[in-house]
Image (spheres, rainbow, N blue to C red):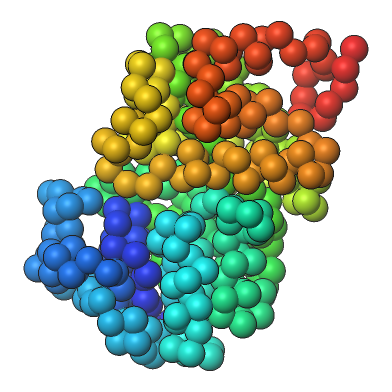
Amino acid sequence: MAMTQATVLGTGAWGTTFAQVLADSGMNVRLWGRNRQTNTLINEGENSTYLPGIELSPALHATDNLGEALQGSDLVAVAIPVAAVRDTLTRARDLLPSNAAIVSLAKGLELGSHKTVHDMITEATGFASNRVAVLSGPNLSREIAEHHPTATVIACEDADLAAQIAEACHTSYFRPYVSTDVIGCEIAGATKNVIAVAIGAAEGFGLGINSRSTLITRGLAEMTRLGTRLGADPGTFAGLSGVGDLVATCSSRLSRNYSFGVRIGQGMSCEEALAVSPGVVEGARAARPILELAHSLGVDMPITEGVVRVVHEGASVREMGEMLLSRPIKMDGWKIELI
């Protein structure tokens, strides 16, 4: 049965953009957000706080009433900061239609538990894991809102449900692919934000394309090591949710994580850089739990470690570079093979 009613939890740039994608595919869409002023803006046709200049569909309706937003939904998209996922979905547990599917647009790990967003959602809602999908790819929200052609991946243990969700968000400018590698897509999505901080810092520090390319390539290697250690398909990291998302996030000032890194590289403190960010910088938040998870599994992630040292331990960008360049010589590739 085709999906006709959708709910998007989150009224930031990505939540609003994805709601517009769903509306353009023919769905009726409600958004939920705590900020009544933002909800009013959306209902008036433009989320000028996060997407100024983008005309929104009249098929969108925003509310701060969670029950109203979820009523009758076939598809629930989670587009809120990772830190708010468990609490929000716990509140939604008894309000969710039992036959709904959930798709996560959030990227990161839970502090302390190191759980993925997929796991947080299943635990908070009681939904079976094969009813919860994740979306990942080179999806800079502003470009999608302006209808620049882009692709994404919908990953779900149930391939048929992944295809159904993909159909629900397929438009002339937004092309979904499907996957069953949920953990691979989640680790790629969380880790690329951390790598983007490092690359932004290098850019802000005045380094060039060679440095950017090195960090992208070696960042891809370390996210692949962590993902495969958790059971992911290494091929996932060569796809849209891996290298595709990594290149986009590490190359554009539209990326909050990259821009945050640039500001640090230019000499701002982390507190100053976070204060001027237009939204949550998930890479700064996720770096430590990702590194802790990697250490617990015996996985080497030097770029992530460098970001943790800079963001949380006061190291300089120069010191991060010196640490990375002084590492032992090894064979090229994503596996650790010293020579």
Q: Nearer the viewer, residue 169 or 302?
A: 302
Q: Residue furthest right?
A: 339
Residue 4, image x and y in percent? 38, 82
Observer able to see residue 305: yes
Residue at position x 36%, y 33% in the image: 271
Q: Is residue 162 left or right of residue 1?
A: right
Q: Is residue 261 above or below residue 51?
A: above
How many numbered discs? 0
| Quarter residue 334 falls in | top right
Find residue 259 and report its image quarter.
Answer: top left
- Above or below residue 83? Residue 246 is above
Rendering coords of residue 125 (x, y %): 56, 80
Q: 303 left or right of 147? A: right
Residue reaching furthest to the left: 44
Name the residue located 62 percent from the left edge and 31 percent from the top edge.
Answer: 304
Q: Is residue 113 left or right of residue 320?
A: right
Q: Is residue 165 visible?
A: no
Residue 171 appears in which quarter of the rendering? bottom left
The quarter in which the C terminus is drawn is: top right
- Outermost residue toward the front in this view: 313
Above/below status of 23 relative to 247: below
Question: Which is more toward the observer, 333 or 66?
Answer: 66
Q: Residue at x 48, y 57 (%)?
A: 82
Q: Residue 310: where, in percent of width, then height? A: 52, 25
Q: At x 37% / y 84%, what residue is drawn?
A: 70
